[in-house]
Image (cartoon, grey):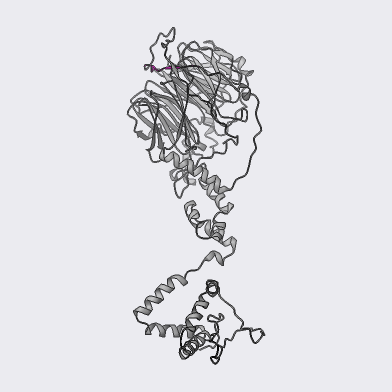
Amino acid sequence: MSSTNYVCDTIPAARLAAGDKALPQPIVVREERKTTPLNETPRKLCVRHQRMADEGTNLKLQQSLDALPFEERETVNTIWSSFSSSSHSRRELILHGLLTMCCFSQLSLLTEQLAHIIRIDPFAILPREVCLKILGNLDAMSLCRAAQVTKKWKALADDDILWRGICEQHIGQKCHKCGWGLPVLEKKRAYRKSPSPGVELLPAKRPMSDDSCDSRPAKRPRSHSPTANDEQMEARHALLAPTLVRSSTRPWKDVYSERLTIERNWRRGRCTVRTLKGHTDGVMCLQFSETMSNPDFPVLITGSYDRTARVWNLETGAQLHCLKGHSRAVRALQFDHVKLITGSMDHTLKVWDWRRGKCIRTLTGHTEGVVCLNFDSNVLASGSVDSTIKVWNLRTGGAFTLRGHSDWVNSVQLWDSSPSTTSSPPSSLAALDDVGSPSPCSSAPQIDPGKMLFSASDDGTIKLWDLTLRTCVRAFTGHVGQVQSMKLLLADQCGDDDPDDKIDESDRASQTEAPSVGESLDQQASPLPTRKKPLLISGSLDNTIKLWDIDTGETLSTFFGHIEGVWAVASDKLRLVSGSHDRTIKVWSREEGKCTATLVGHRGAVSCLALGEDKIVSGSDDWDVKVWSFSGW
């Protein structure tokens, strides 16, 4: 048996009471022992015995030893000294022998003591880089719990690098591990919130005026609600004069915490509600934007049966402009940083400079009311009560008509199916001067290859049109009621890729033989890179919401929950929302197909809505616009 001694001096030399004869000091032999003073015993403590020294364990043991008679102290010290000077193998032998001599009471004592002393704090001995590597495998909840252990653990668990990784894993997408996704909020303004002015006005009773020259009855009666006095338009100069915004850097843990609070509010249906009053009839369409640098506040524009479109400061609730010009109800609108285009039951579309509140141009061509529109940088599409769709080229000024539906066209949505298609910059207001009413014999305007159009109609169908060929290439059938609204989620808005969407090289080769929708014959020779397909969502008066496969025209899933027809749908990467004639707004989990929250507050049918990262804006037949904020709870 080797006589090599253990390198850790575990038990200090016995200290006897005064007057007692000295006990022999335990002899500890170490390799490469250095010369030390005679009155100083060299010590080399391992991690555990260093912790014992910090906790005062040896001092307590010495006090217990001092309480024994001298003979017993000598016996105990001899045992300890023999064990301390023994080699590792001899120590194991001694311990095995002692265990065989122990009764259950001693074994119970050992179990109680070992449960504590066998523990070790890994972060007390490992390098910081290794500690961060270990903590990098934890989720956010586990990191928060780790931060509550000790101050050292908190300093490690709150490291900015760790939380940045968690933010990248969850923000803007759904985590593959936990299934949670958090809103981006990257475009959230750093402006200082000012107190909102009083936007709730006392209603004044007066008779409701009907639209003149309305030869065709409305699809549903408009709700009779009390009117509200128009607010004084204030702060219009803010639309033209941007203000400087100071940015600051925050810890990534705070960034995650803020977004987690908002996501929890979404899932639990907890929100604060503001009501914007000003319209004197049902609100039929709306859009808001929080991404503009000028103005530096979020802008909301709404259209109503009161024949006006109104521009609001969404932060304060103040009305900035009331755009008057249409002779009948405003049923559709869309705006960007340059222009606003509205569609009305007076058969026209109007182009506005919404910053100044001026009408720039009026487009005519439909023979009946315009109920929907959609534009991008080059093309404007509008759907009408006359069952037709007009496509206006914003570059050339030409237009043509698509016919195929047998009833009202309620929604249109443009789509660039070719990923290689490059779009030109957005058209300016000056370029819109060339857009006019087309004549029946005008030549077809030049449309970019791959430009497609979805249209939804009261005939219960959704059609996909190739604007280059001016023909319908696919029909989506499945709804048993009028299709009122539609939302196309592009590839980068559909969230994380599903396992079914990942294809190998053999599948990739087979897919090149059957081109997807929108791929012309001349593109088959050079297949395009595989990318995730957009997702089509529709809402109908059959009380359901459907998700569609745009390549096959088949229904992927159907959502049930509303007890009356669905008038509006909106969606992003994380959730889907819908507004219904039953006066409710429902928030859905798109992947699970279940309703996560139901918002109640409108007194009439919810006819339109828009979805943001932390809010929903809805318009109703009760004349109100409501802002449901999930960040202020």
Query: Is 363 or 516 nearer to us in this picture?
Result: 363
Q: Residue at x 48, y 83 (%)?
A: 65
In the displayed structure, 408 sits above or below 528; it is above
**Corner quadrant of residue 547:** top left
Does the stretch in magenta take in 224?
yes
Magenta segment boundaries in residue numbering? 221-229
| The quadrant where residue 551 appears | top left
Location of residue 180 in the rendering, given as x and y in whole percent from the top left corner? 45, 45
- What residue sits 41% from the left and 40% below the top? 268
User: Given the current orientation, which residue lies at the most extreme top position?
Assistant: 213
**x then y, percent, for residue 376:** 55, 25
Residue lying farthest to the bottom in this orientation: 21
- Left of 63 or right of it: where is 407? left
Q: For this rendering, which residue is in front, 447 or 72?
A: 72
Q: Position of residue 4 (x, y in %)?
A: 55, 86
By secondary structure, the bulk of the magenta-drawn segment is best described as: loop
